[in-house]
Image: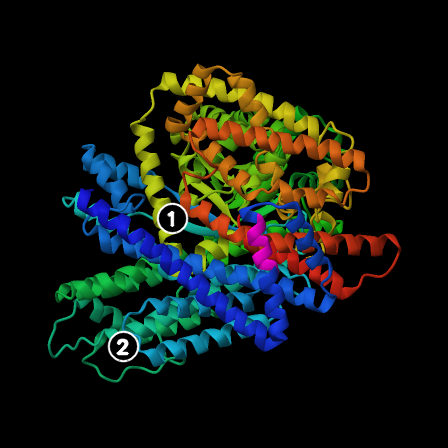
Amino acid sequence: MSEQESTQLAVNRPHSNNLLRRDVRFLGNILGDVLVHQGGHELLEIVEKIREMSKALRAEFLPELFDEFKQVIDALNPEIRHQVIRAFAIYFQLVNIAEQNHRIRRKRDYERSAGETVQPGSIESAVQVLREQGIAVDEVKEMIEGISLELVMTAHPTEATRRAVLDIHQRIANEVMELDNPTLTYREREKLREKLLNEVLTLWQTDELRDRKPTVIDEVRNGMYYFDETLFEVLPSVYEELERCLDKYYPQERWHVPAYLRFGSWIGGDRDGNPSVTANVTWETLTLQRELVLEKYDELLRELMGQLSFSTNIVTVSAELVESIKKDRQHLELRAVELWRNENEPYKIKLCYMLEKLVNTHNDALKHSQLRYNSPEELKEDLLVIDRSLRHHFADYVADTHIRKLIRQVELFGFHLAALDVRQHSQEHENAMSEVLSNMNIVENYGALNEEEKIDLLHRLLKDPRPLTSPHFEYSEGTQECLDVYRTIYRAQQEFGVNCIGSYLISMTQGASDMLEVMVFAKEVGLFRQENDGKVRCTLQAVPLFETIDDLHEAPDIMEKLFALPVYRQAVEARGNLHEIMLGYSDSNKDGGAVTANWELRVALNAITSAAKKFDVKLKFFHGRGGALGRGGMPLNRSILAQPPHTVGGGIKITEQGEVLSSRYSMKGIAYRSLEQATWALVTAARLARYPEQEAADVAEWDEISKGISETALRKYQDLIFRDPDFLTFFKESTPLPEIGELNIGSRPSKRKNSDRFEDLRAIPWVFAWTQSRYLLPAWYAAGTALQDYVQGDKDRLETLRAMYDQFPFFTSLIDNLQMALAKADLQIAAEYAEMISESTIRERIFTQIKEEYERTSSLILQITGQAEILDNVPVIQESIRLRNPYVDPLSYMQVQLLLELRESRARGEEDDPELLREVLLTINGIAAGLRNTG
């Protein structure tokens, strides 16, 4: 970048930030008008007073001001308090919208100012580096054909945003973006303000809380919202950009990039701990997804009707197109669509028949007939006929602009929209297998067999073509449902295509038998079959989910045992010699803390990859990240580059959940930028796998240092979490954990069993509760002790950690995640939550320990990074947190007060005051919106 360009960008950045402040102020003023309109000047004045005091306390903490601040909050009567909570919560919704819009604005500003300069982190920058490093076109082709990313939506909505609220947010975002339009007249700006005032008023009068838990189908529809609003349009655009860049830097090749970037879903397929996800629900999910994608194709084909007006009076279309129309006329009678009457416009006639076939695709009675599309490949072939004909009369631009994009959409979304993963707990399979084998007199008590006996038995059953089940047996409800799931998968693959469900995930995989049980059930319904010639046909893969630290340690041995079994190895071969492995970030973090979880995941990645290499099996790792920092949450591009480069060769899957979905995919501009950065990271990782930038000796030394740091962190973390007898009391009483379960944010229970044991608590509420109470403890605790134990005042060791931070992606990612957690944590406010603990000795002892560790961790991070303050390396986020805190703080103090009232009432045996409970839940929503990274 030239000096002139650098200066221009530096000048534009403050201007851009001023626009963000303008938008926040503008929306804040509108909210102020709504407050006056709805609650009078008194409401606005009390909100402003609390905000100003909170802001002043952030600038300088004065005990007397703090006491006054708390008195003001304590003195609020319930009706006013309710409105104050909503005012701060809605303010955050508006700030989040402004910040999302600003991300789009910053990208546009950069592109305007930079001219032909390539933006860092863009697709073009990744391809440009390939060219600059002299990497030949054949090698680039290999790299592009080898990259793969599947982003999987899951139903873990720790933000409770309702669809109605999302729709209002979308309208506000579009209208705020219009403020940048320099051609607006004064009257048009006034009109825009009136529209925004109306939307914010509607938001104020819309209930942000659900009156019931969402059903699984509600969650399915929420997930489909993002396909409908952004992804169906944005995903092909990312492909277009990659092909444009490859054409620019490698023009000797005609590029059609294979499908490397897709979206999948767990919603409607994830039955682990959720009895509401049944085989019927899974079938309904797939049906809804097909309906949406067919509606999308219908809409686009109708748009083409208005665009492809080419006349045979002027051009000569291909003989292939003429022949295809003739064939359609022989087989199809138009019922749902009216035939285009102008015989000189053959494209419109062809599109009429295509639309009819698309309508008939909904009709199962017409299955396998020529009256409908029986596969997306048939629709794609019709589009290719049109594409080739357009190029025949030199309408290439039209083909490239309209047809090529639609072909890409058919390739990506098929007739199933998104691949649905099925997940179930391993114990459920064992229970069902025990019953089935007992009924058939094969073994009386399968569960009592040791692991080797189970493996031997299941391997023999897998090779045996005889069935294990019979319609004459009556099975228990659990076993019947288990069997119905496999039958539904088989039926779905026949109806929607084999790509609709290909992965069956097994929670708590602790042995090879857990995997073989799934394969034996798959064989039972025809998803796995060994032909007479010995060849194996397999359309479903058992995917292990290794979650705890112990599971990660056992994972390589488990996979080696499986790969050594001839029939299982043939099943892998039938799936392209590719095996999917899922790694759980949530439970490993809950089990061992952030530092150890990250290290153990890295070790497992390397060890499992080595085990698979012995059998020439490629691996696709599925990273079960949450949105929260304590659950592996980080930007998409960083989560890709954090992996050892040689472990990404078979592709990557990553879960997308919580507020990540709305923050990344509710707006087209942000969805595009996020997916563009992910593509940049994939191409970069593929390059680094072939041409590493670090010497192997350095990485080996740094791995050894990281291992020692992890071991110390694990001891420190588990000393508190598992070995302190009072810790669970501290956790439950100083966080809103009990109340989180009452927020209707998901169809799944917050515990795996009806138990108060720590082991049975799901990782999501564990992290969410710590975030609400501002500790964010799972995301940073024990790091300071571990780093200090390594450094021990030795300057050379500190320099080593600085070099690792600068050059070792794993360590860079770890330190930066710790920084983000430390920045969002606030021990001053956490101390208020600690006051809710009934026993002062427990409170003081454990809180002091946490506070000392926080200070220790902050100090070590600053020494390693050389920064003056936490997050100096990301000033945009640092500033965002700084600006948000004065608004989050009042919600936190009010939440503590409300929790005390609610718990005291319950201790007296009184029935819950519904308004009091509602206020608690509103503060939970508001704090989640204010802090982000909570899901």
Query: Is residue 51 on the magenta stretch?
Result: yes
Residue at 62 percent across and 37 percent down: it is 777
Part of the protein shown in magenta: 50-57
Per the image, the residue denoted by label 1 is: 261
**What amino acid is labelled 1 in the image?**
Leu
Rate crowding at label 2 as few (under 14), some (14 to 19) or many (20 or more) other CA atoms within 10 Å. Answer: few
**540 lies above or below 16:** above
Residue at 75 percent across and 42 percent down: it is 439
Q: Which mark is residue 800?
A: none
**What amino acid is labelled 2 in the image?**
Gly
Which sits in the foreground, 234 or 97?
97
Which sits in the foreground, 527 or 834?
834
- Considering the whole magenta stretch, tell me its main secondary structure: helix
Position of residue 906 in the picture relative to residue 877 (left or right): right
Q: Position of residue 452 (x, y in %)?
A: 65, 24
Q: Position of residue 123 (x, y in %)?
A: 29, 46
The furthest residue to the bottom: 341
Per the image, the residue denoted by label 2 is: 306
